[in-house]
Image (spheres, helix red, strand yellow):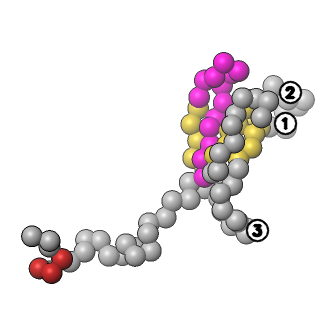
Amino acid sequence: MSNGHIAQMGKGVLFMNEKRTNEKSPDWKGTILLSEDYKAGQVVKLAGWTKNTPKGQLISLSEDNWKPPAAAAGTYPREVNDNDVPF
């Protein structure tokens, strides 16, 4: 990209909008390269970090789509029996 950002799956940036034409124009504009397929109406959680760069301040974005592994869901703490211990 011409703004110096290298696109990565699940990551994106918002740059301060220096071309605001009126009060309703967005303060920040940018892109995110999605790593999953989403359906209409599905909520996409995002995480963001403010960063200073030579081209100005930006907000670095990441998809926040972490989910616990299905096998681990609801099984912690797990009961251990003697056959599970290797020594």
Q: Position of residue 74 (x, y in %)?
A: 36, 75
**Residue at the location (59% across, 28% down)?**
51
Q: Residue furthest right?
A: 21
Marks 1 and 2, the one that precedes in the sequence: 2
* Of the two numbered discs 3 and 1 in the rendering, the one whose residue sits closer to the viewer: 3
Q: Which residues are magenta?
A: 51-63
Q: Is residue 62 above or below residue 13?
A: below
Q: Kindly report the distance in space between the C-alpha atoms of the residues bearing marks 1 and 2.
A: 9 Å
Q: Residue furthest front?
A: 87
Instruction: Please give left or right for residue 39 compared with residue 59 in the image.
Output: right
Which residue bears the numbered disc 2? 19
Please, what is the three-letter code of the amino acid marked with disc 2?
Lys
- Residues marked 1 and 2 touching at CB (< 8 Å): yes
Using the image as rendered, state which of residue 70 and residue 20 is in the foreground: 70
**Residue at the location (29% across, 71% down)?**
76
Which numbered marker is on residue 40?
A: 3
Which numbered marker is on residue 58?
A: none
Which residue bears the numbered disc 1? 25
